[in-house]
Structure formats: structure tokens, C-alpha cells
Image (cartoon, rainbow, N blue to C red):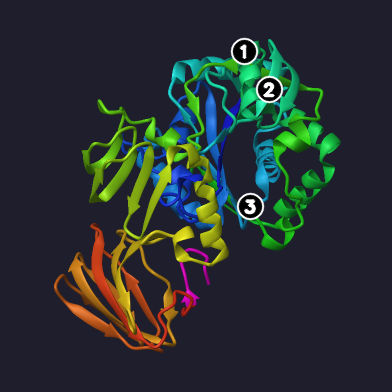
Amino acid sequence: MQLITTILCGGAGSRLWPVSREFHPKPFIRLADGQSLLQKAFLRGAQLDGVAEILTVTNRELYFKTEDEFREINTQKLPTSFILEPFGRNTAAAIAAATIQVGKKYGDDAIMLVLAADHLISNQPAFQHAVTQAMALAAGGKLVTFGITPTTPEIAYGYIEAEGNRVIRFVEKPALEKAKEYLASGRFLWNSGIFCFSIGSMLREMELHCPKILATTRACIASSRTSEGNNFSQIELDPGQFDAVPEDSIDYVVMEKSSQVAVVPCDIGWSDIGSWTAFGDLTEPDEQGNRILGEALLHSTTNCTIQSNYRLVGAVGLENLIIVDTPDAVLVAHKDNSQEVKHIYAELKAKGHESHKVHRTVHRPWGTYTMLEEGNGFKIKRIEVNPGASLSLQMHHHRSEHWIVVSGMAKVFNNDKEFFVQTNESTYVSAGHKHRLENPGLLNLVMIEVQSGSYLGEDDIIRFEDNYGRV
């Protein structure tokens, strides 16, 4: 049996703001060992017996970040493929698109394993054992979900009542007293959101229970742009067609309604890292129960989680608090309210505040830029361009730009002139000039950009040519 691991990489991760943002969601958060949750999901799937390919369903805006994450760790050169959504349509649409694509390539008997990009699984051997069981059930026509043996009366997870591999019922997130009953009964499992099924089985059940989602997704794929290369393929879903796909979860439209569902109970060290309390628990506490990620000085402080990778945090006389410091935003919350951080994120989004969307360092297909300072009529950025990469051929109506090369060498196109700018040299681009920046070297190009003008918004840009499909 061909096994294809499918990673669903999306969501806002609003409960982990301010580190998680719309364009830097939870899967991209790095843990203490330097790997992101997304990279751990990739490695988890890649290390399974018999895996043929890693397929990732993600937002179009996150594609280049995702590709960079995989390039760091895909040492075995496992084939990768991508389905790029223009916007989210929940898990049913994502899984429908993945199932259709895998079926085209591998046929109805292929087995698909669906993983979330932002979960953590610490016991790989136990996970492999659970996948082996799930594949056997999937080969027999079952749609398999992974049920986690509960250890606490958790109210943030859905539950599955089960008897062996038989699913009795799915239960929504319960109140605390009901969760305590579930835990005491020994009949309930946490619903992990990990699935395993054969292509033919899932297509038949979707045809039966959510035919509109399946039909509209098929129509979308048929009209979408595809590209292929060596050990690589990509489909960019058509926005107009994808907008017609109903938005719903795979749990609701298929798993809770199908008579073909089975569960594999397992204890695999699973967590969905759904709050700063859960994230902090990944770090060993000190003698006072404090969990520190970064640099902090504490006095009379107990049971606090503090993360600061940029500045020193001093804490005096605090208990049971979460403090998360980033260059442009600080979170202070009581641990009892860690699930409510999402309300801050939602309010920032409603107000259109940039800190819900991006960090000061913004990733682009060609590299990154970091906002250093801005004021009335000026903005200063640090720009880093990857070797061989180039920005689009573009023009700005309202701003001029002064570029100073800090390291590396820049190839510049400016108003029909092409020239090189070396380290410690600079050049000037006037408003209204067509221009392009390229790194022709083997090392990263680092430069400082000083913008000046009457309007400095990122939307003051006209692209004429672009290597990344953004024209």
C-alpha cells in the first residue's frame, strides 16, 4: 500500500498571539530545539514506514515559508507536493482537495494519513505503531481517527466514546464536570484530528454525506493552475471556484455521520499546544515553578511562564502569569485565562491593526525585511535577499528609496540602467522609477532601505514582472 502523508497547515493560532500571527501562524513557531511545529510534523510523516510523498495543504501566502521550512530538514529528498488555498474553507474542503489529487496519482487503494501542522507528538515509535493499526483498518474500508488516551479532564478538546476500535459517538468540547465524568469512565478518548483512510473510501463517504463539497472541489481543481518538477508538484486553487466550496469541518460532515468510522486508541505523547500554558509546559520549570524561554530575572515570582527572545524581562512579586514579549507587542495574562488570548487577537483583527497579521520581520519569497523605525514621512527597513533571489520589477508612486549595502553585492535595475552595488556603497531610487533588486551572489545580501515620501504603505506598489506569480 502506498502511504501519502498529508499535512494541513493553516489557521491563525490566535491563542498563541503575539508570537503567532496571520502570516506567521502557530505551525511556524520554533521550539527550544530550533525546529518549528511544521518541521516536526514533516519529519513525523517522513519517518513512517512506506511513505511515498508528503502533501501539504496551505494558504497561498504561506507557500514560500513552508517550502523554506521543508528545505531545511528534507535531507532524504522525499517527494513533496502542495495544494495552495487562496483562503481557508475549513478541513472538509482541504481534505477533499487532497483526496482528489492523491487519487489521481496513486489510485483509490492508496492510503492517506492526515496530520495537523501545529500538533506535537513526542513518542514516534508509539505513533508508528498506531499508524500501522490505522492502515490495516483503512485497507478494510474504514475511515480511521486517532483517539488519545486522556490524562486530565480537558475541556478544550472534543471527545470520542469508544469500545476498542468501534466509535460509539463523538462529543463536543464538554464542561469541566462532564469532562471529569468522561475521564473517570475510561470509555472516552480525546479527538486528535489525525485521520487515516483509503482514497476510495473517503471519496465514497464524501459523495454520500457532503456531495456538494466534493463536487465543487473537483470543479475547482479542474480549473486551477498546476505545475510539476523533479520530486515536486503544486496546484494553486482558483479563488473564484474555491469560493463556491461550502465551508465545514471533516468531523461534522463525514466522521460524525459515516457508518464506516473506526478509532485507534493511542498514547503517543500528543498535544495540540492550544495555549501559552501548554506551550510553557514544554519547558522544564525552575524550583519556583517558573518556565523561562529567553532571558529573565525574577524575584519573589512563582509559577509564571515568560518568553522573551529579544529583551531582558524583570519580574517581581508575580504569580501564575504569562508574559510574552516580542519586538512590537507584549502579552500579559493570568494562566487561568490563557484560552482567552484569542479575544485580543480578534479585536486587533477587527481594528485592522498590523500586529494581528505580521511581525516586524516579514517573510517574502525572496527573503525577509525587518521594520527598524518609522515616523512622519520616513521608514527604515533591514532587507535580506537570499542568494540568487530577486524582488519584482516594480514602481512606487509616492515614495523614494535609498539603499545601503551592508554585506554582499546587489544587482540593481533603476530606470533603464543596470549596475552593481558593493558592500559599503549605496544607490537612490526616485518615486516613479521602475526598479528591481537582485542578489547575484552565493551569500545573503543584507542592506538598509530608507524610504521617504508622502505615503509609505506597503500597497503603494505596481509590479510589472515577478518570479513568484504576484503580478
Question: Which residue is the site of mark 1?
Answer: 184
Regarding residue 141, the answer to whether it shows in the image is no
Front in this rendered view, residue 126 or 395: 126
Say which quarter of the image contains residue 193: top right
Q: Is residue 289 above or below residue 236?
A: above
Give yes or no for residue 468 being in the magenta stretch. Answer: yes
Give yes or no for residue 307 being in the magenta stretch. Answer: no
Question: Which residue is the site of mark 2?
Answer: 160
Question: Which residue is the site of mark 3?
Answer: 88
Which of discs 1 and 2 lies nearer the camera? The answer is 1
Please state the extent of the stretch shown in magenta in the rendering: 463-471
Q: Is residue 121 above or below residue 411?
A: above
Question: For the stretch drawn in magenta, what is the main secondary structure?
Answer: loop
Q: Is residue 153 above or below residue 293?
A: above
Disc 1 secondary structure class: helix
Type of the residue with mark 2: Ile
Which of discs 3 and 1 lies nearer the camera? The answer is 1
Q: CA–CA distance between discs 1 and 2?
A: 14 Å
